[in-house]
Amino acid sequence: MSFLDQIDPLKQEALAELKAAADLAALDQARIQVLGSHGKLTGLLKQLGTLPKQERPGAGKLINDAKAELESVLLERRTELERKAAMPNEPSDFTLPGRRRALGKLHPLTQVTEEIVRSFRRIGFAVADGPEIEDEYHCFDALNTPADHPARDVQDTFYLESPEPVTDGPSARLLRTHTSSVQIRVMKKQAPPVRIIVPGRVYRRDNPDATHNPTFHQIEGLYVDRQVTVGDLIGTVEFVFRELLGKDVKLRFRPHYFSYTEPSFEIDFSSSLVRKMGKDWLEIAGCGMVHPQVFENVGYDPEVWSGWAFGFGIERIAMIRYGVNDIRLFYENDLRFLQQF
Amino acid sequence: MKVTLSWLKEYVDFTWSHEELRERLTMLGLEVEGMERIGGEFEGVVVAQIVSSDKHPNADKLSVCRVTDGQQERQIVCGAKNFQAGDKVPLALPGATLPTPSGEPPFTIKTGKIRGVESHGMMCSPKELGLAEDAQGLMILPPEAQVGQTFAAHLGRPAGDVVYDLEITPNRPDLNSVIGIAREISALTGNPLRTPELGSPGTAAAEIVTAEQCVCVHLADPDLCPRYVARIIRGVTVGASPDWLRSRLEQIGIRSINNVVDVTNFVMMETGQPLHAFDYHLLARNSQSGCPTIIVRRAADGEKFVTLDGQQRTLSAQMLLIADETKAVALAGVMGGHNSEINLNTANVLLESAYFKPQNIRATSKKLELRTDASYRFERGADIEICDWASWRAAQLIVQAGGGQIVPGAVDAYPTPFRPRQITLRHAKVNELLGIDLAPAQNIEFLRRVGLDVFDPSDESCTVKAPSFRVDLKREVDLIEEIVRLYGVDKIPSTPPRGAIGLHACDAAHDQLAETRRILVGLGLNEAQGQTLISHPSAELARSASSNEAASELAALARPLSSDMNVLRPSLLPGLLDALRHNLNHKRNDVALFEIGRVFARNSGEFREERRLALAMTGQRRPAFWCGPDREAKVDIFDLKGVVEELLDHLGIRGVTYQRRSSPTGLYVESADVQLGKFRLGEIGQVLPALAKRYDLRDPAFVAEFNLDLVLARRSTARAFKALPAFPSIRRDVAMIVPEATTHEAVLNAVKQAKAQNLEEVQLFDVFRGKNVPAGQKSVAYAFTYRNLERTLTDAEVNAAHEKLVNELKRTLHATVRE
């Protein structure tokens, strides 16, 4: 039998073997027998030298074609067997729950605070803070609320026990009733213009119930510059609340009274959410133009500088936004609550 | 402050509906907190008379009547039979709403066609009016019924009214009166304010006694009581109030007592001026003059006095009394005395109308914890100029309600007359502050409307005299507020936020806190917010945990709400333990929480606050899963430490060490201080089982707390790129048996000391006790990675370095290397 006549039967035999290989090991065995360094086809290649010189290219091409065909079949078969090997015995149930890596949640009050802070920062406000244990001077006196002022009734205050006899003096220590005390600290320290927001904890002497907790959070904005107007106040408040409560929100300013602003306003808002609660307006914040007396107290000239301040309760916003009906939920840290936000 | 719509309408005209009035008052700064409709039954139902009745052209059972309602004749289609022409009946006019069983929509009468014939109203049966369960035919009224009268009036039922509950801000005491509120409405509408016309006091004939002959007034402290008006009414019959007076008071929630007291309350509500009536005969008389002297004086320290409510009060020298020559008769501005009150035998009344210094009344009322309608008004600032007018008004009403005569004249002790404050308004300032463009004339018009006397007007400015009732008007900006209230804040155009850069040191800290929170949330912990105010025992618990805090004291409240909330937290841990308990009690056993917040203490008298981070973990390590050997593994100390390490690494805190504390504390069974060099960053440990039990914890609980201010201050955020290694590394593992007491840190120190060449990394991969490991020892296995950054290492050189290292470890750690 001629040398060349061996090629085709060899190829056919090898193809059959490759196709019959039941697993990757058998396939490899078959490959070695034909294509390995001692394999049959490799053997034929080695015999090429025995052929007359002019026949060698033709024979070489025949052998290489057979080799290429076998390799291609081999690859195909291997891919198939590999796929078979990777396939689990039973099909996976993709409806089974996955192995979770739990992510924690930010407290809803943090989330709301962050959103408010983000809006203010977009228009150039910096976050400021001050101590929670304050004195009467920063919390009341400097804010134009002297000791005998009836407005102090509105804010029932926690005083701290102190080693000295408890005095009703400007240095009597208390838990701040509003973040407005930080206004005074900041203005006393830095020259105008001022542009700050102050998120933080505040305290009122209220027994805990669905709408009160002795501890709660406020955020306060203060802007002092030349020629600041009520129009500026309205514009900024509108900007922030639209960011916070949605574009459809409507705001209403009502004259009100705060001792450290004049004129003072309360802000009501209305939205589809409020209407769903069966109301036209919901009170959400207080604001006003900084009282000239406050400027005088911190050493700013009210003839040169004007400004506005506004503040609101973070719990209140969170309660409206998420429909939370009891403020105490924010302080129980029940995971079933925290994980909803 | 409560006020009715009808009462307001006595002083000012307006055409607003009750809803619109609510809106207007609210937008003026008088927030309406409540609005209640009272009375007003059978609205739209009148007494009518049937003129004629004919058969309905298209229906046998109906008739077509001509009916007069007193104003006009109407055609009414009717189904009843029990009437004849001339009968008087209740007629519901179009628009009237008739009662329906609760839950059903109201039934409103409309003009309509019934079987082709127009009907302009409905004649009613008792059932249709809700007056009977069942009734046949129309309600036939008695012949004397007055055609055109409202049906409610016919029945003697009160007319409809609306009670408003207004929130009056503390700066506007003048609004604690019906006239004050009416004045605001007058300012808004421009309609005049109508105050009651008082008859002339009349001139006394020579033989008639005058007030001056009946009473003397001595102001011992004119600073605390700058004005006192005394007036006398003789021959009064004390008894029930007339209906109008009783209903005016009852509608706004004031109980009717008797005609004299009711009049004083009525005038207080009307004018804002508190009044007090004494029984003239119960006042001690001067033996010489024969008439009593009212002395307004300070109490003696410790003086006892029984107020109207029967309570005995102990007074101090700061408190002001109304007294006669022998005894105190009233606590000035707060409450009258038991010994001189109006009673059924009272015939002669001494009426007090005074002004007291607000600060003094406020202090007295606060100290005695006694709040009254009078003290509420005086401490906010009453109207010193109205004293005599209010007294005169009340005297007239007392005579009207209880008979008797007013003794001519009054004793008016008023040594220093009121001088109005003058305030100048610059028109430019108005526009500058409000951001609008108002003409000077407009400003002046607004100021006049709120009752201010404007003079010296020019293009630039004008000056006003602040009336005595406007104690809030002190400076220019207060006038600007009046202008914006009347102009309407809703008309001020908003200007978009201006560009500027705010600066404050806390701004960066805020971002760092946010970053810390995000990392912890990413690590699977939920953020908590605890109460700042906690109980003393809880606070002590946390304080005992940290030895170096023992020196500081707790920050405590002077007047706590309860013993559950009487100190400021010295640590966040008690709050987190509370949160663990709350969750476990609600069957959430697997809890991982953190809180960032402030803690408080007092160090040698100075209050101190510090920002902390606390962490707590208990229960299962991983969320529920349905296979695998460790799916039910519980959290241990290394889970918490892992969180801490990950956080500190990300924050860029390097070189942290953990030093085990030698003994348990009040909080921990086992714990460690977390140190950064000489700084103590915090602590970490396992909660004492006895304590865990007290908090209802089932599984071991692990907590940690850090001084976050300190941690954030020690951050290193510097980052520098290190070239990626170009040459391969070689790993060698070593398992060795060491004494139990040998810590991981000790091993690392030993490795460091050995200074092995080309050693890149050491990693612990196994700690084992048990089979083949002697008691009191443990097997620890480390992987050592060697690499040179410039070339590929050979096996031989790594082996040499490694062997040297292992020998060194054997020597320094007394370790046996397992082959």
Image (cartoon, rainbow, N blue to C red):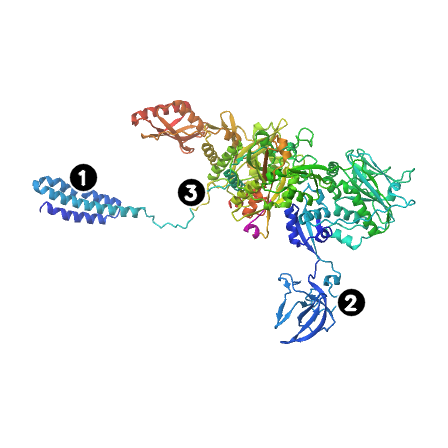
Q: Is residue A272 magenta?
A: yes
Q: Let me know if marks 1 and 3 both belong to one chain.
A: no
Q: Identify the residue at image location x=91%, y=40%.
A: B290
Q: Amino acid at mark 3?
A: Pro
Kindly check if marks 2 and 3 are in contact, taking CB atoms under 8 A apart as contact. Answer: no
Query: On the image, numbered disc 1 is attached to which residue?
Result: A37
Question: What's drawn in magenta, residue-wise?
Answer: A267-275
Above or below — where is B445 with respect to B550? below
Q: Chain of mark 2?
A: B
Residue B384, image quadrant: top right
Query: On the image, numbered disc 2 is attached to which residue?
Result: B144
- Closer to the camera in the image, B808 or B592: B592
Residue A61, image quadrant: top left
Q: Is residue B690 visible?
A: no
Left or right of residue B792: residue B524: right
> Dot 3 lies on which element?
loop
* Distance from Cα at disc 2 to Cα at disc 1: 133 Å
Q: Nearer the viewer, mark 2 or mark 1?
A: 2
Above or below — where is A171 with respect to A220? above
In percent of width and height, residue B604 lies at: 63, 26
Above or below — where is A224 with respect to A245? above
Query: On the image, numbered disc 3 is attached to which residue?
Result: B629
Q: Nearer the viewer, mark 2 or mark 3?
A: 2
Kindly check if marks 1 and 3 are in contact, taking CB atoms under 8 A apart as contact. Answer: no
- Closer to the camera in the image, A158 or A269: A269
